[in-house]
Image: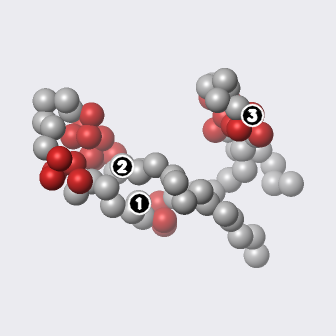
């Protein structure tokens, strides 16, 4: 069985239906926005390995999120 060490400082993952509200600069309601800061359903997530290029902030391109073979 594989185990994974997920970073405990992971950013909030928004549900698709909440993205517009989160990004709407006209509706800055801290109480409403706070309600969006809930754990994302782990059943909706998928863990997969990515290249070590992810560790360099200079690398900001699609290859950073492409799945690579398990090693």
* Residue 50 x/y as whole percent: 72, 44
**Label 3 SS:** helix
In contact (CB < 8 Å): disc 3 and disc 1: no
In contact (CB < 8 Å): disc 1 and disc 2: yes
Say which residue label 3 marks.
Answer: 53
Q: Residue at x 33, y 61 (%)?
A: 38
Q: Is residue 62 above or below residue 8?
A: above
Q: Is residue 58 above or below residue 6?
A: above
Q: Residue at x 31, y 55 (%)?
A: 37
Q: Residue at x 48, y 66 (%)?
A: 43
Spatial CA span between label 3 and label 1: 26 Å
Q: Which colour scheme appears in the figure?
A: secondary structure
**In front of the other: label 3 or label 1?**
3
* Residue 56 x/y as whole percent: 70, 32
**Label 1 SS:** loop
**Label 2 SS:** loop
Screen quadrant of the N terminus: bottom right
Screen quadrant of the C terminus: bottom right
* Residue 59 x/y as whole percent: 67, 26
Q: Earlier in the sequence, mark 3 or mark 1?
A: 1
Q: Which numbered circle lies on residue 40?
A: 1
Q: Earlier in the sequence, mark 1 or mark 2?
A: 2
Say which residue label 2 marks.
Answer: 14
* Residue 21 x/y as whole percent: 21, 40
Spatial CA span between label 1 and label 2: 7 Å
Asked whether 53 or 31 is in front, the reply is 31
Q: Using the rendered view, name the quadrant where residue 53 is placed.
A: top right
Q: Earlier in the sequence, mark 2 or mark 3?
A: 2
Q: Which numbered circle lies on residue 23?
A: none
């Amino acid at each position: 069985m594989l185990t994974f060490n997920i970073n405990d400082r992971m950013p909030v993952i928004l549900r698709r239906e909440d993205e517009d509200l989160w990004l709407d600069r006209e509706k800055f309601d801290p109480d409403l926005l706070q309600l969006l800061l809930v754990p994302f359903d782990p059943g909706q997530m998928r863990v997969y390995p990515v290249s070590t290029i992810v560790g360099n902030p200079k690398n900001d391109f699609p290859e950073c999120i492409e799945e690579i073979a398990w090693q």
